[in-house]
Amino acid sequence: MTIATIIGAIFFLPSIALNVALAFGAPLGLYAMNGRNKVVPKEARKAFIIPICMQFFAMFVLLSAGHIVPEIIPFMITRILAFFFAVYLTFYTATVLFSTAYRERMVMGSFAVVATICFWITAFGTLDF
């Protein structure tokens, strides 16, 4: 489970980095939002703040559930959040894989698939069988 947690965190980082870069106006719009804009318009950049915070929290939950970082949140809540983010990433991955933008589908979709699988492995690893 520890290896899956680390791999999941590594493959989740490009998604966080992309959202941060898009929020700051980097010309990477072809990798997000169906590739509608090469540069995200200024008025739409504020919409990236909440997903960035949520992704950092999801990363913390993943690392906490995998016992990589100290547990600040009670483990039962971490377990529930691990499954929540695994489900969330499953739907996110589906939207990325059905994107009309080739770059988003191939590049970000690959990262999303691996990260989602690792989130599921870590979430199931928290269960006591």
Image (cartoon, rainbow, N blue to C red):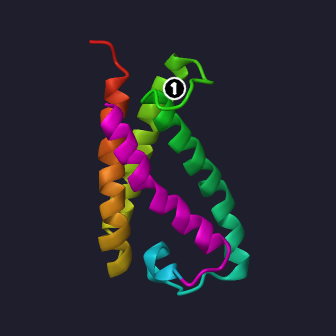
The N terminus: image quadrant? top left
Q: Residue at x 61, y 23 (%)?
A: 73
Vertical position of residue 46 compared to residue 121: above or below? below
Horizontal and vertical percent position of residue 51? 60, 56
Q: Residue at x 36, y 50 (%)?
A: 115
Is residue 120 at least partly visible in the picture?
A: no
Vertical position of residue 77 compared to residue 7: above or below? above
Vertical position of residue 71 compared to residue 21: above or below? above
- Is disc 1 placed on a helix, strand or loop? helix
Vertical position of residue 68 compared to residue 114: above or below? above
Q: Which residues are magenta?
A: 1-27
The question of residue 11 being in magenta is answered with: yes
Q: Is residue 101 left or right of residue 33?
A: left
Q: Is residue 125 left or right of residue 62?
A: left
The question of residue 122 being in magenta is answered with: no
Name of the residue lying farthest toward the left: 129
Residue beneath disc 1: 78
The type of residue carrying mark 1 is Thr
Q: Is residue 107 left or right of residue 32?
A: left
Q: Residue at x 46, y 40 (%)?
A: 85
Horizontal and vertical percent position of residue 102? 32, 80
Name of the residue lying farthest toward the top: 129
Quarter of the image where one finds residue 123: top left
Horizontal and vertical percent position of residue 24? 68, 74
Is residue 87 at least partly visible in the picture?
A: yes
Nearest the viewer among 47 and 61 is 61
Quarter of the image where one finds residue 34: bottom left
Q: Residue at x 64, y 50 (%)?
A: 53
Quarter of the image where one finds residue 72: top right
Q: How many marks?
A: 1
